[in-house]
Image (cartoon, helix red, strand yellow):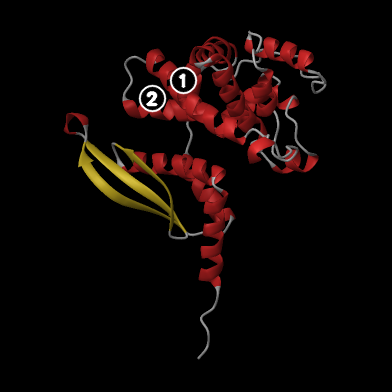
């Protein structure tokens, strides 16, 4: 799935100047950035960010949000054009495999992005998604600096040609439901899949919509041409939401604590 083609020297030290960063980004992206501040922000984890003007944090979370949306659109476009005879479910699953956090983490390592991230040692040791988050933020920075076409060029002509084998990636089995079950069991949370809708889709084919409940808290919804497909799609949605929404994690943990309290003796 991944082709081992180095983009920059993996032993380079973190950049010390804007000029050095521009050179590193040129090797990585194939073009020089216009507004370097976006890329510096994309590489800055909140653990080392300082409070900036107008109360806006100078870290990469906002760029990560933007890059996530841009990546979904670009990868969807690439997958749609590459697999011209495949159905919606196949295209959705293939896109999910490419934009999932594990894949983005590997991409960050392959292009040397992980070595440029500014974060404290504690974050490096405890955040398994540091590289993938920075990759999304990088795409957000490219979008603000150069626009959609530059993002497409980077993903289609560099990443999808030089690193990812899209055909092998599409054939890779990713069981999101198993991952979610494993996560729930590890944290001793109750997990439930509930069918919420069944309707006729394109060509009178049945479409199923399911929701994922963890400690009776809805964490995601998904749909498919079978209940199994809808469970997989809902699990994928839940895993992504759990990764991004700390308040949801707190709500689930609180529900679990409340449920485990013994009833008072009267």
Q: Is residue 242 left or right of residue 133?
A: left
Query: Residue shown at 63%/8% (left/top)?
Result: 30
Q: Is residue 124 left or right of residue 146?
A: right
Neighbor class of circle 1 (other Cα within 10 Å; few <14, some 14-19, many 20+) is some
Q: Is residue 227 left or right of residue 254?
A: left
Residue 78, percent from left and from top: 44, 16
Say which of 260 and 172 sits in front.
260
Query: Residue shown at 71%/20% (left/top)?
Result: 112
Neighbor class of circle 2 (other Cα within 10 Å; few <14, some 14-19, many 20+) is many
The local secondary structure at tag 1 comes to helix
Farthest-out residue, bottom: 266
Q: Answer with the quarter of the image where residue 192 lies.
A: bottom left
Q: Answer with the quarter of the image where residue 114 lies.
A: top right
Say which of 23 and 252 sits in front.
23
Residue 49, percent from left and from top: 73, 37
Quadrant holding the N terminus: top right
Q: Which residue is mark 2?
A: 91
Measure the alpha-carbon separation of dots 2 and 1: 13 Å
Q: Give the mark toward the camera: 2 or 1.
A: 1
- In the displayed structure, 190 sits above or below 109; it is below
Farthest-out residue, left: 204
Which mark, residue 74? 1
């Amino acid at each position: 799935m991944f082709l081992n083609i180095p983009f920059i020297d993996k032993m380079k030290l973190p950049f010390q100047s804007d000029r050095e960063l521009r050179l590193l980004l040129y090797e990585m992206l194939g073009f020089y950035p216009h507004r370097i501040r976006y890329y510096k922000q994309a590489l800055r984890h909140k653990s080392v960010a300082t409070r900036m003007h107008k109360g806006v944090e100078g870290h990469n979370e906002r760029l990560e949000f933007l890059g996530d949306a841009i990546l979904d659109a670009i990868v969807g476009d690439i997958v749609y054009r590459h697999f011209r005879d495949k159905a919606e479910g196949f295209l959705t699953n293939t896109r999910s495999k490419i934009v999932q956090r594990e894949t983005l983490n590997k991409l960050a390592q392959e292009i040397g992005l992980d070595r440029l991230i500014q974060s404290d040692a504690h974050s490096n040791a405890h955040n398994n998604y540091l590289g993938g988050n920075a990759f999304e933020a990088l795409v957000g920075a490219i979008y603000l600096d150069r626009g959609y076409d530059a993002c497409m060029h980077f993903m289609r002509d560099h990443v999808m040609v030089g690193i990812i084998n899209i055909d092998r990636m599409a054939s890779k089995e990713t069981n999101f439901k198993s991952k979610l079950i494993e996560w729930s069991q590890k944290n001793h949370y109750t997990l439930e899949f509930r069918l919420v809708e069944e309707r006729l889709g394109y060509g009178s084919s049945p479409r199923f919509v399911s929701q994922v409940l963890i400690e009776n808290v809805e964490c995601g919804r998904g749909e498919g041409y079978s209940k199994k497909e809808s469970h997989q799609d809902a699990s994928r949605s839940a895993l992504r939401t759990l990764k991004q929404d700390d308040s949801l994690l707190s709500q689930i943990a609180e529900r679990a604590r409340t449920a485990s309290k013994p009833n008072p003796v009267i």
